[in-house]
Image (cartoon, rainbow, N blue to C red):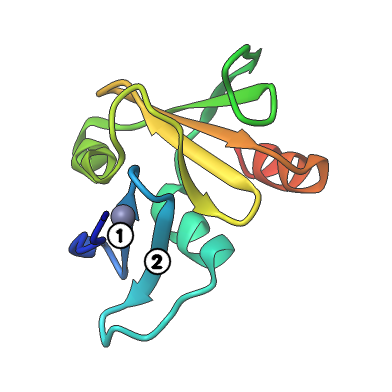
Amino acid sequence: MHICDVAPAPLGQVSLSVCADCAHYAWTDAAGSPVDPAEGIASVFGPFPLIERLTAIGAPGGLALIYQVPARYRSRLSVLPIGVWTQIHPALFASQDGMNLMLAPTDPAVSRSVAATG
Ligand SMILES: [Zn+2]
């Protein structure tokens, strides 16, 4: 039986815990209170420039948005497993390759809003 005991990773003002085994994810603030996933994503990944939109076979929604992560923020990526789509929002999966952030929206409305922030 899978026991989910992933520790929250501090990412600036908020923390994110993700578990690729059971798709559990949680955004919390410094006090441990829940944070809206959309706010968490905007706060942690919002400043990164969108560099590519790809039709991606294997991405949960069929679309991958690639964001360039400045070197000083690259440690934030370590919360995400490399090469595995992990849910971080009701309609958004994320992955990374060590240098770039990849988001895969599963809802077209979310796709438009996150693409607009890039
Ligand atoms: Zn788990």
Quadrant of the frame with the C terminus: top right
Quadrant assignment, res 24: bottom left
Give percent across and percent down for residue 40.
Answer: 46, 63
Q: How many numbered callouts?
A: 2
Decide if residue 88 is on the left or right side of residue 15. right
Residue 80: x and y in percent read: 31, 40
Q: Amino acid at mark 2?
A: Ala
Per the image, label 1 sits on a secondary structure element best described as: strand
Q: Secondary structure at mark 2?
A: strand
| Among the 4 quarters of the image, the one containing residue 59 | top right
Q: Position of residue 70 (x, y in %)?
A: 30, 32
Quarter location, residue 62: top right
The residue at which mark 1 appears reads as 17
Give the residue displayed 60% in from the left and 23% down from the top.
Answer: 64
Residue at disc 2, CB closer than 8 Å to ligand 1? no
Tags 1 and 2 touching, CB below 8 Å: yes
* Residue sitting at x 33%, y 61%: 16
